[in-house]
Each structure stands twice: as structure tokens, then as C-alpha cells.
Amino acid sequence: MNDMRAAVLVEPGRFDLRYVPRPEPDREEVLVRIARTGICGTDIHIFNGHYAADKLPMIPGHEFTGHVAAWGKAVSGFAEGQPVVVDMNIGCNRCYWCRRNEILNCPEMQQMGITMDGAFADYIAVPARLVIPAPDDTPAEVLALTEPLSCVVRAARKAKVTFGQSVVVMGAGPIGNLHVQLLRTIGAAPIVASDISPERRAKAKDGGADIVVPPDSLKDAVMRATHGRGADIVIESVGSPALYAEAQNLMRKGGHLAAFGLAGAGETLALDILQTILQENSVKGSVAGMGQDMHDALTLLTHGRINTEPFTGAEYSLEDIQTAFDTFAERTKDLKTQIVM
């Protein structure tokens, strides 16, 4: 009765479905019964052994929603069965970076499903301060998109995107397509998206991109759309050093490169220092939503500002999680895959 199912990544490429002790919430924690957990690109990096390999064996998963099951003695304001989403970034809540909502720079930072056990399981115990109540009438498959959308919200906030700005999105995978939809909501124009996959290019077009092209046509398309200036903002959403290098040639003088796609450890970007200085170009990284980003993402989802249908079609049970990961790369038509508990 005190055990739960959990998908443990025991080594790169191999899950083991186990019964493990169900966590008990401490005095400042909430126990969440998980309903759905999305598969993130970071999860794929972990699965392939490219990231957090020193943490294995581990239960991955951080894009989740569920229902309140129990809470600690110091916690109040929750009800049993209440739907919630959870901010997966755990900071010390007292240092310089935590006060500035820059949790990833906290010296004590932990991330659910990345540096500690996560949500490919029946239950997870989380700090109560990171639990966000969700509306009863919002489907779980939509709520599970809160964390990935929060990452996009933060990237747009960091890049200071506003209406009428031209933006290039390099990569039209799940996050690239969320970028496109959010940019459309903000009022950016024109939005130019590129991807090697015809299926994902088509989804980007449906999601609001004004121009969609394969990578070998991207520069010409951007220059035509911006009267030869280059884009105000370029978002690299793939994690390719070659695309990061190309991005510098797609933005206008005084433009901004939003570094979003995760490259490998030690991979570098050759930056033309003189050009960057004289043209007043800027580069800023952003990878995970946190704090207010999560609240804003939930608000956008519950008020229908994002068309979630393209992201909710692929579902696997926890028992089939190995298949879900093994086939992930070949299922380019599936923008998002969720594990249903």
C-alpha cells in the first residue's frame, strides 16, 4: 500500500519499471498524485546519456500535472483532489539569484527529474511554495503543457519581444512551435520559421508563422521579409553550434540572438567581437521557466491563447515508456508525447 510505480532510468537508453516507496511529504511539502507527464527534449538528452548521466539511476520527468493527495503539517490552502501544476526548479529561496527569480544560478539549485527524482511515477513530493492550483475544468493534457510553455514565456521576456518585431525561429519542434504561437499572440511580425521536417514546418505554418522554409532557404527568406536588414530577433531552438553560427547572419544590426537550444557541454560559439560591439548586437540565454513564468503560462493555457491540439496527440502508458522514448526521434509528426498515469 505504501509503494508506487516508477519508471527508473537505470542507464542511458534503458528504463526499468519498478515499485518503489511512495514519498511522504515533509512539513512544508505537498504530495501530488501525477496525472500526466510530458517528454521534454531534456529528457531525451538524459535518456541518450548526454546530460545528467552522473545522476542515474533516476526517475526523470518534469513537465507534469496532477492532483493534491496529501500535505505536510506546515502547509495550508490546499484541498485533496485539487488539480495543480508544479514549478520544477528548486532554489534555496534566500540567495541573491533566488530573490531575482534566477533560480538556475542558485548555488543550491535542484531540478525535479533532472538532478533529483521526478514525475515518471505515480506520486511526487514537492515544496508547497512551488505548487500552483489549476482550474478544475482545464484538461490534464493541457495543464501538462504549462512547464514547456513557461520556458517559451521566459525566452520571450528575456528577448523583450514586442509587437511588430520580426522574429526568426530556427527549429519547429515542440518548443519551436510554442515559440511561434506565443510570438503570434504577442504580435511579432513577420515570424519566419525553419525546420528540416516538412511535417513540423506545416505545423508551424498552422500555428501562425508567416513564412516557413527549409533551412537551406532560410537566409534568403529572412532578407526578403525584412527588406535586407535581417530580423530583429533570432531564436535558436535546436541546440546546433552550426545554427548558432548561422543565426548571427540572420539578425539585423542591433539585433538580438536568443540562445535557447541546448548544445553539448563544451561546444562554443565563435562571436565576431568587433561586429557585436559596433552593431550593438546582443545575445542572451534562456532555458527554463520559473516563478512568474509558470503562472503566466498557466494563464495563457487556461484562457485559450495557445492552440494545444497539436501537442496532445501522442499518449503512452507508464508501462510503455520505453517504447515512447525509443520511437521519439522517428515520430516527427508528434510535437509532444505525454505519459498518462
Image: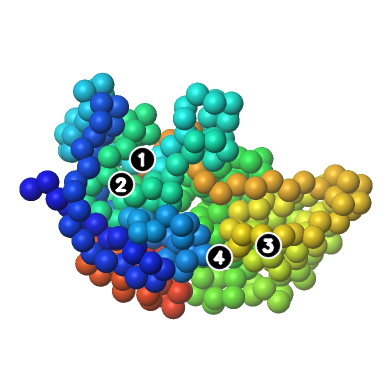
Residue drawn 49% across the image and 36% down it: 108
Circle 2 Cα neighbour tier, 10 Å, few/some/many (<14 / 14–19 / ≥20): many
Q: Is residue 317 above or below residue 22?
A: below
Label 3 vs 2, first from the N-terminus: 2
For the residue labelled by badge 4, is the local secondary structure a helix, a strand or a loop? loop
Question: What x and y, as percent, mark residue 306?
Answer: 44, 50
Marks 3 and 4 sit apart, C-alpha to C-alpha, by 22 Å
Residue picked out by circle 4: 172
Marks 4 and 2 sit apart, C-alpha to C-alpha, by 25 Å
Label 4 vs 1, first from the N-terminus: 1
Circle 3 Cα neighbour tier, 10 Å, few/some/many (<14 / 14–19 / ≥20): few
Three-letter code for the amino acid on which mark 2 is drawn = Thr
Which numbered mark, 3 or 2, is in the foreground of this view?
3
For the residue labelled by badge 3, is the local secondary structure a helix, a strand or a loop? loop
Three-letter code for the amino acid on which mark 3 is drawn = Glu
Residue picked out by circle 2: 65
Label 1 vs 3, first from the N-terminus: 1
Tag 4–tag 1 contact (CB < 8 Å): no
Tag 2–tag 1 contact (CB < 8 Å): yes
Residue drawn 21% across the image and 38% down it: 24
Label 4 vs 2, first from the N-terminus: 2
Marks 3 and 2 sit apart, C-alpha to C-alpha, by 34 Å
Marks 2 and 1 sit apart, C-alpha to C-alpha, by 7 Å
Which numbered mark, 4 or 1, is in the foreground of this view?
1
- Residue 267 shows which numbered tag? 3
Three-letter code for the amino acid on which mark 4 is drawn = Ala
Marks 1 and 3 sit apart, C-alpha to C-alpha, by 31 Å
Label 3 vs 4, first from the N-terminus: 4
For the residue labelled by badge 1, is the local secondary structure a helix, a strand or a loop? strand
Question: What x and y, as percent, mark residue 333?
Answer: 43, 73
Residue picked out by circle 1: 86
